[in-house]
Image (cartoon, grey):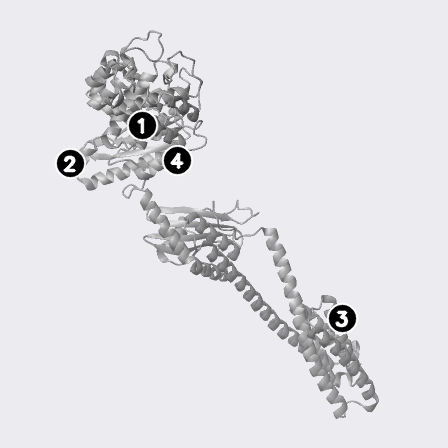
Amino acid sequence: MSTIPALVSDPRQQEIRARALDERFDADRRQIGERVAVMFRWIFLAVLGGLINLTSITSLQAKDTVDIVLGLWAAIALVVTVLLFRGYRPGKQFSLTTMTLDVLFAAALVYLSDGFNSPYFLALFLSVITNAVRFGATASVISAVAIAIIYLFVGGSFTPTTISSDPNARLSAIGIVFLFLVVALATGYMTRELERERRQAVRRAAQADLLREMSSSIVGDTDIKDVFGAVAGSALAMSGALQGDMVLASPDGFAVVATRVRAGAAVAGVAPLDDAQLTHATRSGEPAFSSDRCTMVIPMASGDGITVLLNLSRPGLAFSNEDLFAVDALSGSSAVALANALRYHRSTEEATTDGLTGLYNVRELRRRLEAAFTRPDRATASVSLLLIDFDHFKSVNDELGHQHGDLVLQMGARIVRSAARAQDIVARYGGDELAIMAADTSGVGAQRLAYRIVDAVHAAAVITIPGKNLTFSIGVATYPEDALSASELIAAADQALYLAKREGKDRACTFPQLVTELELANGNLMAMLADAGPQVVVAAAHAVDHRSPVTQGHSSRVAAISESLARVMGVTGPELENLRNAAFLHDIGHMALAVDGQGPEMPHHAEEGERIVVGAKFSEAVSSAVRHHHERWDGQGKPDALAGESIPRPARILAVAEAFEAVTAGRGYERTAPAAALDKLKLGSGTEFDPHVIEALARCVAEGGLEPPLPALALPAVVVPEVPTPA
């Protein structure tokens, strides 16, 4: 899960923040307007006071009255100045009040003096100028028209009659109105530009904060999806786009790595990715726009033949150059993080993928398989494995060279990848072998997939050598029907592949088909084992276990337990491989004995098993382990009454593994948990069992390493000898 926080907030939150920001701008504008008004007011008061008292413009009769008006106006100006000095933030009512008082005092001065000829009309410009700052350009123009009308008619110089009858008066009136409008428009335009610049500055500051937040969030993250998702989210916040896609452009095409959609936005109308736009941006390194500019593609970073592209969509609303500028800033701020994530992604790909085919490598396949077998729901989840062999591939390299062989491998890999499901893990398993891990797929589903691949390679008609087309041999196995562990599943699929090649190639075979063939072998079993050897040991074990419901999964679980014990005891190399083969074949003797109702362990099956294993040309270590796996440490066992270390070590390990499997699976006993089963077997340590192997068993149980899946159904009770207790 990503640790990078989401950088695109809910639209309702954005609306609230935008409304709050507008209110803050309005309040700031009014405060600035009042400060400008105070400044101009004191200037006008000083100039007007000088004109009244130091010149003879105003008559003596009106001088005292004008001084009183100026005094009242000065008193109001002083109150406003003190309030603003103390940090008061004026509201709309306050600004309307001061504006009205300014107009009234100015009109009074004009009325008390010479009307149209009075120089005091300059006081009216105070309201026009400050209204632009207080309320904006529109309010300033409206107030300019109103003040012009007041100025024209308050002094008695103009009347509607004189304006309509006297051309000179009409021209003068128009000039006066025009003068007020010019002042209003000029100051309004300057105010609007200043406000726009301020808003842009605030927006850039917010974008810078967003960039810093994003950079700090992704600086230590190397997961390509997390980093790309954070960048796409930031791009939405900065550009107003509805959807953002981070795309990797490579010689193989375009791949969307991360997508972000604005919360609450309807994106049904968002256009799909335009390959032409993506190609143009990749090749030119420059942004590319759609014809309506509602989509833009911006190159963000590049390296090693890979280009990171950001595709932004905003249906119905074109992107501006300012949007492009903001995203370019984002590109610069995120370049290092994008390059690091891309570099880490490439190194991870190199560690997990095959360089020739682009598929996963065998190491990653095995890791995914092991992970599938540790899932909490593994008891109910199916996992299928397909091993795919390129038929007659050696002749391709021999006749046409390795370069042509590589081309055939690449084309075959594409066929398999196209036929598989998107969620399937497709890997290069070996030189000319591929593998598919199909999670949550039954044996029937895996078989259908195999047939689909065989049909697909036929349809592709890939020429390997003159006159020959590429064909596949495929082996299919499924957990839990065909195997109980990852290693056994691989072996089962490999043995099914052996059957497909033996049957003539160019076909798919399943592991159950091979098991059935071995079950029906009768007298030919030894010959089949001799012919195939280790390639069919797992299938032979399943054929043995199919003889009775009681023995289902027995050999597979004994093999898994034996391998765990051996690894704890330090058994490696050929000895471990011999033990594994012996574990799968330890009951093979039952295949040659008639079922006589004596239960799963028929007399002399160990000796008969040795005969089959020797005849099949397995090593002496395997045959001796099969013969002696029922010997006892105290010499009371069968068939040769060997004691102590004279019993081959693989046989001693098998004896403990088989007894532990029987107790934990409930084969003849009440099903017991591993810890309780260990206590039961400890009673036979030094008498029936090798004490060193019991110690290894205790370590395995303590480490939780002995948990092979149990049979799905409770086993029927079968009377078998109890694990003996010491004398």
Which residue matches tag 4?
371
Direction left: furthest residue = 399
Which residue, given by chain and number where applicable, does mark 2 sit on? 399
Q: Secondary structure at mark 1?
A: helix
- In the rendered view, tell whether residue 656 sits above or below residue 21: above
Query: Label 1 vs label 2: CA separation?
Result: 56 Å
Q: For residue 97, which numbered disc appears in the image?
A: 3
Q: CA distance from mark 1 to mark 4?
A: 31 Å
- The amino acid type found where label 4 is placed reads Ala
Task: Name which residue type carries label 3.
Answer: Thr
Q: Earlier in the sequence, mark 4 or mark 2?
A: 4
Query: Mark 4 to mark 3: distance in Å?
Result: 76 Å
The residue drawn where x is 15% and y is 36% is: 399
- Name the residue at 28% across, 38% down: 411
Q: Earlier in the sequence, mark 2 or mark 3?
A: 3
How many angstroms separate mark 2 from mark 3 (CA)? 100 Å
